[in-house]
């Protein structure tokens, strides 16, 4: 497997930031969708889109989840065991908020993983999933719609996955979510209340190798992992110690190729641990 390049991941984030605020159903969001699809296709992946509409506090919106599939053993890509590696590419509906770290960093890492993960060399299919609508439209995640003004894309795709799995045509081995993972002063957390113990051990080992502080959050946090909790999940993010969270200062200068490279190489190393899946 080729080496993960933090510079490549950073270039992807720069492109996304250049589109402007990527809030749901906006021109910048559609530009980001085209870019993600183009880069996945360039890497040779099979690409699917999950397009749906949902009611939000600001009206009916169209959401677009993007799935890049890297086939493992030669078989139909909609059957068999899969590992989902997910992030969100949307930004919160705030003035001048371009989400370099919050939405951009995970997207950059997944697009670089698309380049380096070789097909037909693993026992599982990898689904690289770019969720739309992770962010709430209201200021607080629990402020509107009985707490459902958030995670629109992951909730919708989790429903589709559950329906397919019920027919025994899909076996979800793990769900790995990356969010806010590119800050120059990198210090990640995982949700200790909901994360799978085996995945925790694997990521803690590789975080040590990469020199990444990875700490348990015993209070827990809601994110795109939650709709997939029937399956083994882990969610890595800089939750408490990112001072630019949901601020217009979440700009490209706050993240670094080095941080992206360390997180990307950590994730790559865990995915290579075939006994985990």
Image: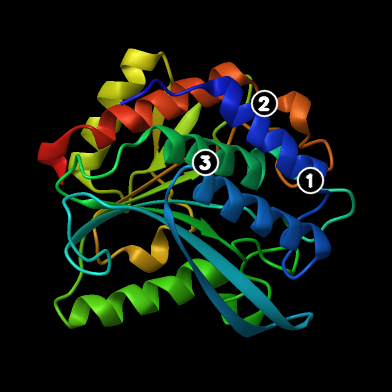
Q: Earlier in the sequence, mark 3 or mark 1?
A: 1
Mark 3–mark 2 distance (CA, rounded to whole Å):
16 Å
Residue most extreme to the right: 95
- Mark carried by residue 249: none
Q: Is residue 106 left or right of residue 135?
A: left
**Label 3 vs label 2, nearer the camera:** 3
Q: Quadrant of residue 259?
A: top right
The answer to whether one can see residue 151 in this image is no
Neighbour class for label 2 at 10 Å: few (<14), some, many (≥20)?
many
Tell me the residue that label 2 is attached to.
255
Q: Is residue 137 left or right of residue 37?
A: right
SS under mark 3: helix
User: Residue at 24% across / 57% down in the picture?
Assistant: 82
Q: Is residue 176 left or right of residue 133?
A: left
The answer to whether one can see residue 221 in this image is yes
SS under mark 2: loop
Query: Measured from the top left, where is residue 224 in percent x and y?
Result: 47, 59
Can you say which quadrant of the picture contains the N terminus?
Answer: top left
Query: Measured from the top left, where is residue 138 in percent x and y?
Result: 74, 69
Tell me the residue that label 3 is attached to.
111
For residue 32, above or below residue 143: above
Mark 2–mark 1 distance (CA, rounded to whole Å):
13 Å
User: Residue at 76% across / 30% down in the picture?
Assistant: 252
Q: Earlier in the sequence, mark 3 or mark 2?
A: 3
Mark 3–mark 1 distance (CA, rounded to whole Å):
18 Å
Q: Which one is in front, 140 or 99? A: 99
Query: Measured from the top left, where is residue 3 in percent x and y?
Result: 39, 20
For residue 266, above or below residue 98: above
For residue 183, above or below residue 54: above
Tell me the residue that label 1 is attached to.
98
SS under mark 1: loop
């Amino acid at each position: 497997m080729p080496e993960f390049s933090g510079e490549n991941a950073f270039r992807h984030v720069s492109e996304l930031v250049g589109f402007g605020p990527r809030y749901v159903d906006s021109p910048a969001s559609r530009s980001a969708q085209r870019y993600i699809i183009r880069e996945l296709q360039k890497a040779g992946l099979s690409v699917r889109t999950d397009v749906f509409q949902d009611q939000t506090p600001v009206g009916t919106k169209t959401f677009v989840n993007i799935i890049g599939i890297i086939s493992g053993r030669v078989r139909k890509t909609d059957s068999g065991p899969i590992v989902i590696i997910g992030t969100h590419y949307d930004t919160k509906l705030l003035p001048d908020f371009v989400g370099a770290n919050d939405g951009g960093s995970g997207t950059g890492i997944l697009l670089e993983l698309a380049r380096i993960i070789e097909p037909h060399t693993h026992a599982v299919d990898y689904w690289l999933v770019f969720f739309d609508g992770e962010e709430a439209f209201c200021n607080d995640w629990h402020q509107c719609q009985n707490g459902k003004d958030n995670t629109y894309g992951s909730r919708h795709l989790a429903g589709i996955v559950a329906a397919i799995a019920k027919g025994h045509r899909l076996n979800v081995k793990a769900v790995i979510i990356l969010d806010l993972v590119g800050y120059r002063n990198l210090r990640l957390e995982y949700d200790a209340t909901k994360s799978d113990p085996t995945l925790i051990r694997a990521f803690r080992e590789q975080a040590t190798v990469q020199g990444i502080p990875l700490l348990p959050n015993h209070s827990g946090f809601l994110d795109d992992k939650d709709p997939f909790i029937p399956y083994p999940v882990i969610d890595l993010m800089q939750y408490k110690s990112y001072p630019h969270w949901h601020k217009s200062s979440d700009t490209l200068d706050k993240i670094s190729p080095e941080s992206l490279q360390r997180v990307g190489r950590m994730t790559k190393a865990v995915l290579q641990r075939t006994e985990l899946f």
